[in-house]
Image (tube, coloured by chain):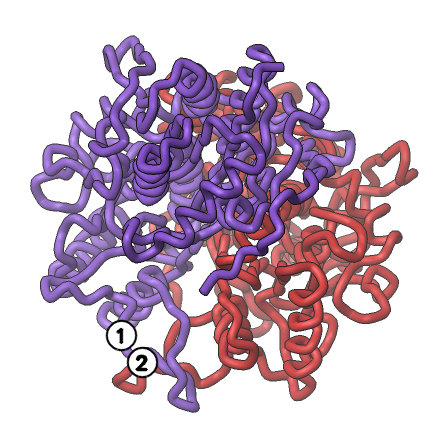
Chain colours: A purple, B red
Amino acid sequence: MSQGTLLYAQSGGVTAVINATAAAVLQAARKRKVRVLGAHNGILGALREDLIDASALTPAEVAALAHTPGGVFGSCRLKLKSLEQDRAKYERLLDVFRAHDVRWFLYNGGNDSADTALKVSHLAEEFGYPLTCVGVPKTIDNDLALTDCCPGFGSAAKYTAVSVRECALDVAAMAETSTKVFIYEVMGRHAGWLAAAAGLAGSGRNAAPHLILFPERAFDSADFLAHVATTVKRVGHCVVVASEGIRDANGRFVDEEGLSDAFGHAQLGGAGAALATRVEQALGLKVHWALPDYLQRSARHLASQTDLEQAKAVGHAAVDCALAGQNAVMPIIVRDSDAPYRWHIDIAPLERIANREKKLPAAFIRADGYGITAAARRYLTPLIAGEAFPPYRADGLPDYPTPRLRFVPRRLQRRYSPG
Amino acid sequence: MSQGTLLYAQSGGVTAVINATAAAVLQAARKRKVRVLGAHNGILGALREDLIDASALTPAEVAALAHTPGGVFGSCRLKLKSLEQDRAKYERLLDVFRAHDVRWFLYNGGNDSADTALKVSHLAEEFGYPLTCVGVPKTIDNDLALTDCCPGFGSAAKYTAVSVRECALDVAAMAETSTKVFIYEVMGRHAGWLAAAAGLAGSGRNAAPHLILFPERAFDSADFLAHVATTVKRVGHCVVVASEGIRDANGRFVDEEGLSDAFGHAQLGGAGAALATRVEQALGLKVHWALPDYLQRSARHLASQTDLEQAKAVGHAAVDCALAGQNAVMPIIVRDSDAPYRWHIDIAPLERIANREKKLPAAFIRADGYGITAAARRYLTPLIAGEAFPPYRADGLPDYPTPRLRFVPRRLQRRYSPG
């Protein structure tokens, strides 16, 4: 064993392949004979000194992570503020790191996590504590700067394209006497990457999805309803894919409709439900809608092979960076060519990634605002290519083991207090 | 070619494997050298004389149907009433059958379709027209009488169990700082078969789904909320599976809550949304919910091998029955043993199936009303066993071809008028 410990933490919403990144981190560290701790429930576990002995997992348990969704050590939503505002928390992190001889910190998340990793590295420098901080990319939102794409996105994109294609066949078969308008709500509050991926479900003027609503375009209710009506007239039905984050020209989310129940309580809604209500009321057409919610980010059963390979590659690369002392960086995916699809891993500074957000380029959205362009297809197609089915058990369910986790004893007297 | 034509029609909601039944019908008929017509959009096409020359499909096109969801010839929701009330329609059907020398009528649907096929056979007898009517079972609701299970259900059940398992891993990873209660709404307005299938996602007191709400049990809001609160306290989160058809003791659906938008319009809701709202209001917990809607019945990408085999078997058997002159019957699935799972096809009279509905047996629902029993697991497990992945294209999507359909020329002067 080398001296020092590598701490790995997951952050934010999990993906179908974040555990594949975890597996790669563990495997790479083992090869280099480095001890690994996992933070329980992300950065919270690091603050609380809830640390899991990841080196105690068997090689088979580690290998199985590559086909198991969820987050093996747990994740959390906790954004640390500036070094000034949250100084006590950052110092606490360093205390925990010191106590467990953590020399390498790998933070697997999105742009918030990149920011946290960067700040931790600044503080360590300030205190003269030898620490290498590496961000590891992950987000189904695909909105990280610099990297060509984000691990987790390709699988969610594949799930979305396949699901929309399947539902479209269902709707088409029944449209004459049943549902005329089908609305599929995708995640992506700020960026329309997943909405765009739905466009891969078909091509051609009459193929579903007929209308895609992107958060990058202001939602115009009258124009949308007119397009729905025209499509139903022409095709017989209309499949709509709506980003959860669509807003009107005044910046109001379409689900901020003031819906309420009989007691005046605000009703939990969503863009899909709100659009369905509008279509039914304005056009009098039978509507159905689907809200895949967490299904789209945990559907490991339909992972993309490209995505799985990239999720593993960033994990391996992050360990290599860390052990080479490359501080405050993130391994990113660089595209060499669309077809055949070729890519490699490069290293980028966290400060060029932290807190930035990559929106869907205007060149990916069709001129009328309701579909994707050929350029979008060229970009998206390789990301959903290839299947990476998990093994299945005899009872018909995928084999998703949840390994027993062993916590290491705490070494600090002081407990973490969130205040 | 034998004399006479076989007419095949699909009815009601399509399934992931109804086209596999269609493929089997076409293949069996070809072997027997019988010409097949497909009714466009189900019984409507038969009434309108919109008939597709199914024999013109190439063997490769027919084979591909076995892995393509949707309904190849189109389906519809149209329930014919009694022979007295809808006599003109039934007579019109016979006119169309006579004009195209239809001697065998295969109607692929649920209990309504069984009823229609039965009535058509009665009328043919009355008119002395030589016709053999055979029902072919299909429904994700699994509520047909006599048959042990219904083609289409096993695949929807597998989709449900896998999706709930995947979402549960997601929720568990994030529960401490994010969603505490996750609600998954399944289809099944009257019978809780799909809700029960969700129970296969886990076993043991702390495994998801923690609470299942069946339409066979009166929904008690206070008791439900108390169970949610206890589960969150014990496990840290709570995964709920709710049938769309749950009702309170007075028979009111939980989504008939009087929800309305700012203009007083009724809001399209659903059990999932209604429960999510109640949980959030009563317990103040962060809630997410998923509404898979048509995804659950069209997810051919996750079909069950058992289901696929049974869907094909009933198609083959229906052709055999028809050509053997077995009138007013339906091929059904008989279970010989649970483990190893063995089954065979038998033939049952339509009059014992038409208009009946098989609910989830009380012995399948746990004493507390919120889970499934060992007996339910024994019944359900073999139905989701085995994977039957469709072939995938290089672009990452399943290969779901939609063959070009060729209509045969109309032979009747008179057009169908729905009045």
Instruction: Identify the residue position indicated by label 2 in the image.
Output: B261
Q: Quadrant of residue B159?
A: top right
Q: CA distance from mark 2 to mark 1?
A: 7 Å
Q: Nearer the viewer, residue B305 or A318?
A: A318
Q: Residue at x 58, y 15 (%)?
A: A2
Residue found 31% across the figure and 65% down from its top:
A285
Instruction: Name the quadrant containing residue B218.
Output: bottom right
Chain identity of mark 2? B
Q: Amino acid at mark 2?
A: Asp
Within 10 Å of disc 2 (Cα), the crowding (few <14, some 14-19, many 20+) is many
Q: Is residue A144 above or below residue B396?
A: below
Decide if residue A87 is on the left or right side of residue A33.
left
Asked if residue B394 is positioned above or below residue B367 in the image, the reply reads: above
Query: For the residue labelled by badge 1, is the local secondary structure a helix, a strand or a loop?
Result: loop
Residue type of the residue flagged with mark 1: Glu
Observer-nearest residue: A122 or A274? A122
Q: Give the position of the C terminus of chain B as an image quadrant.
A: bottom left
Q: In the image, is residue A201 above or below residue B287?
A: above
Indicate left or right for B415 with B313 as reference: left
Residues at discs 2 and 1 in contact (Cβ within 8 Å): yes
Asked if residue B20 lies left or right of residue A224, the reply is right
Marks 2, 1: nearer the viewer = 1
Question: Which residue is label 1 attached to?
Answer: A257
Residue under mark 1: which chain is it in? A
Q: Is residue B6 visible?
A: no
**A42 to the left or right of B309:** left
Bin the neighbour count of mark 1 within 10 Å (Cα to Cα): few under 14, some 14-19, many 20 and up. Answer: some
